[in-house]
Image (cartoon, grey):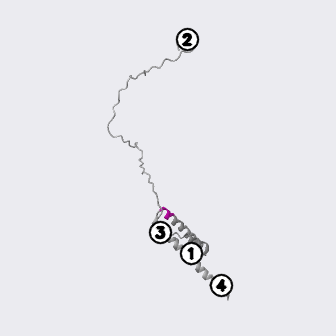
Amino acid sequence: MDPSNQPPGATPPPPAYQNKHAGYSPSFPSQPVPQGSYAQGPYPGQTVVSMQPAVNLTFTPLAKPEPDYLCYSIFTMMCCCCSFLGIGAMVFSSFTQNANYSGQRALAEKNSKMARILNHLAVAVGITIFVLLIISQFVFKE
């Protein structure tokens, strides 16, 4: 815009853009690049934390799973007098199923054996209590 065409009292426009910056040379000389290692170390007083890469584990179910004795555990929990042994057997049956699914044979064998022992023990205690009740009825009847 030409300053002669401006109305009276108007402010003059800003100066036109010039491609020169005050204090800088028109071209920048190339900077020397230092040679050597560029490994960044820790700041003084800073602790170093090293992280291990993430490991993804995939489990495959066992081809021949261990028996879990779940039905036996339900039977001993419901029908035997010693239901707390049946509950324990049910818990170990569940652990056996989880170990079979995740492919841990040693853990599945251990839990399966414990479930079987608790089930046998619950049946033995239940039969013993049942027999003692029958005997006591005949002895005290007379």
Q: Measure the alpha-carbon separation of dots 4 and 1.
A: 23 Å
First along the sequence among labels 3 and 1: 3
Q: From which residue to which does the magenta span run?
A: 98-102
Q: Measure the alpha-carbon separation of dots 1 and 2.
A: 110 Å
Name the amino acid type tagged 3: Glu
Q: Residue 5 got which mark?
A: 2
First along the sequence among labels 4 and 3: 3
Q: Secondary structure at mark 1?
A: helix
Name the amino acid type tagged 1: Ala
Residue where numbered disc 4 is placed: 137
Q: Measure the alpha-carbon separation of dots 4 and 3.
A: 42 Å
The single residue placed furthest to the right in the displayed view is 141
Residue where numbered disc 1 is placed: 122
Q: Is residue 24 magenta?
A: no
* In-front residue for pair 141/57: 57
Neighbour tally class for label 4: few under 14, some 14-19, many 20 plus, Cα within 10 Å: few
Name which quarter of the figure residue 18 lies in. top left
Residue where numbered disc 3 is placed: 109
